Structures are given as C-alpha cells and as structure tokens.
Amino acid sequence: MSERTRAHLWAMRSLFAALCAAVIFCRILPLSTLPSGWAGPDLIMALAFAWVLRRPQYAPPLLIALVVLLADLMFQRPPGLWAALIVLACEALKARAPGLRDMGFGPEWLMVAVTALGVTIIYRLSLAILLVPQAPLGLSLMQMAMTVLCYPLVVMVSSLLLGVRKARPSEGGIRGRI
C-alpha cells in the first residue's frame, strides 16, 4: 500500500471524527435557556450512515463506536446503548451497500429511513424494558424523521464538498479494504 493512500485514509478518518466532534460541540453550546419545541436531526447517525454506504473504510466500526459513545456521554444518554445500535445499523447497511450501489438514491434513502426507524424503536424499547426515563415518543419520532429528511443534505455535502463518493466496481477497496 502506498503511503499516499494510507495518509489519505487516515485523513478521511480524522475528518469523520472532526465532523462528529463539531456536531457534538455545536449541540452542547448553551445558545438558549428555553427548551425547544422540536427535535433536531441526529447528524452523527446521518453522517455515519452516509459514509458507511459510500466508503466504509473511512468510518470503521471502532471509530463510529468511539464517536457515538462520546456523544452518549456528552448528551447524558445511557452510555453505550445508542453507540451499539448505531454500530449494528452501520454494519447492516454496509452489508447491503453493494446491492444499493447499482440502484439510485431512492432505495438507499428508503433503506436508511427503515434502519433509522428500527434503531429508534429498539432504543426506546430497551429503555422501556430497563425502566429508564425517556423523552416523549413524539420527540423521538421527530428526531428520527428530521434525521431521515436531512440525510440527502448530508450525502450531498459529503459527496460534493468532502469527496466521499460511492466506490465504483473498478476501484479497489469497495468492501472496506484498501
């Protein structure tokens, strides 16, 4: 493997971590003292899904787990549960990525929506079984819907500005290897 390829790989992994850290930082800023009436999107989940479907080697499972675990700690969620669900969802999407590669954006968006809904339902059921207090169902569904709605924007920014495009079959490394 050439040093340029290895340096590019680590630069993209660092960029993924930096983007997620920026999202965490922006969410913990005390911009308003009043609670908002709506739930914003989970940009870390949308970013992880977009990058895993395009270039899985840029967002390996351990990096995703560490970033989402940090988000769990910073957002005062039960540590590890959301991180584990996001890693499992990313691995499920990664397994379906070769089939989605030949299709358009619509089936990919639908698969991401179904996966986000599944993660949200499993998360809420897990918290309910463990009797952990949780946000109202409407806010959780609103956050999931906002994440799905912002997914095309995340894909567009990742593709056009950051160069994270789908791997072509002629390129090496389409299965997560280089």
Image (spheres, rainbow, N blue to C red):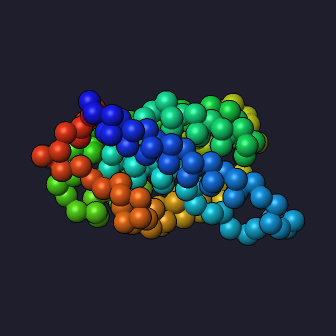
Residue extending furthest toward the right: 33
Q: Is residue 97 above or below residue 35?
A: above
Q: Quadrant of residue 177?
A: top left
Task: Pinpoint residue 48: horizontal percent, then vertical percent.
Answer: 46, 47
Q: Residue at x 41, y 64 (%)?
A: 161
Residue 143 occupies quadrant: bottom right
Residue that appears at 37% across and 66% down = 160
**In the rendering, at what x and y percent does residue 93 appear?**
35, 43
**Residue 155 in sight:** no
Q: Is residue 63 left or right of residue 90?
A: right
Q: Nearer the viewer, residue 16 or 154?
A: 16
Image quadrant in which the C terminus is located: top left
For the N terminus, which image quadrant? top left
Q: Position of residue 94 (x, y in %)?
A: 33, 40
From what the image shows, is residue 12 above or below residue 137?
A: above
Q: Nearer the viewer, residue 67 or 99?
A: 67
Q: Residue lying farthest front? A: 3
Residue shown at the point (59%, 40%) measured from the top left: 68
Residue occupying the point 62% across, 31% down: 80
Q: How many marks overall?
A: 0
Give residue 112's position: percent from left, percent from top.
Answer: 39, 53
Query: Quick check: can you spot residue 79?
Result: yes
